Image (cartoon, rainbow, N blue to C red):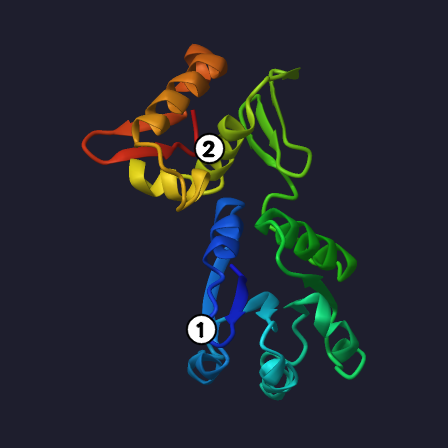
Amino acid sequence: MESLLLIESNGSSLKQVKSQFVRSGFRVVVCDAAGLERLDAGKERFLLIVADGTDSSRLAGTVAQVRSKPFLKEIGLVLLIKESQMKELGQLTGVEDFLILPCDPSMVESRVRFVLKRMNRSAPGEEGIQVGKLKLDIDRYEVTLDGEPLELTYKEFELLKFLATHPGKVFSRDQLLNQVWGYDFIGGTRTVDVHIRRLRAKLGPKYASLIDTVRNVGYKFLENL
């Protein structure tokens, strides 16, 4: 599976951006510009590169360093910049698109998906997820069961999407809380249990079993009914 490469800059953190992509089923590798030297060209294959360019003193250098690596030279590059850096973009080559920070991590994901479509590359979840007669349309935030729309709240959908895009993997309540609600959420892990119960109730007796409880650990999404 190809990864999304996130490049941090000058001690910045793309933790929330990473969490957004992980929730949506992307495999993510994070490093700083210096860490590019340690990437294994023989093992890693990248779908797209997202680089934090908000440090003006390193913006051009970061782009040049990325493009100097033979195994990254042809990979699409999206820059995250400040509005004051707009003029600098005209002096850069090898950049497919950009996004101005600060912005919501979901906007970063939307732009990345847009760029991938423009480059005729497939992003995780675009084909949707289907188990039996349960279908998730990631892009449209729609769920249908036996052809009928399933009314889910935003967090119920995000929780189902996260579990369904990582089938067979067990997640603790803390992990689900961090990935779906975010690191700054102040509620307890009981929130996860409540949403799991609601999801199971809406899925009905047959499909509720797709969300399996792993005793003393957490939950996982089964690959088959």
SS class, disc 1: loop
Q: Is residue 2 above or below residue 169?
A: below
Asked whether 203 or 52 is in front, the reply is 52
Mark 1: amino acid = Gly
Residue at image coords 79%, 77%: 87
Q: Is residue 62 visible?
A: no
Q: CA distance from mark 2 to mark 1?
A: 30 Å
Tag of residue 156 = none
- Say whether residue 80 is visible: yes
Q: Which of the two discs, 2 and 1, labels the residue nearer the N terminus?
A: 1
- Image quarter of residue 56: bottom right
Q: Does 92 sit left or right of 80 as displayed? A: right
**Is 127 situated above or below 144?**
below
Which label number is shown at residue 11? Answer: 1
The residue under the point 68% across, 70% down is 76
- Is residue 108 or residue 166 the one in the foreground? 108
Query: Of residues 106 and 81, which is closer to you in this image?
Result: 81
Residue at left 36%, top 27%? 191
Label 2 element class: helix
Against 59, residue 140 (above or below) is above
The x, y position of residue 2, in whole percent, is 54, 62
The residue wearing badge 2 is: 159
Local crowd at mark 1 within 10 Å, few (<14), some, or many (≥20)? few
Q: Residue flagged by tag 2: what amino acid is it?
A: Leu
Q: Quadrant of residue 214?
A: top left
Q: At which x and y percent is residue 136?
A: 59, 30
Mark 2–mark 1 CB contact (< 8 Å)? no
Image coordinates of residue 170 in percent, x first then y, are 31, 40
Picture coordinates of residue 181 (x, y %)? 44, 38
Q: Residues within 10 Å of mark 2 (few under 14, many from 20)?
A: many
Q: Quadrant of the C terminus?
A: top left
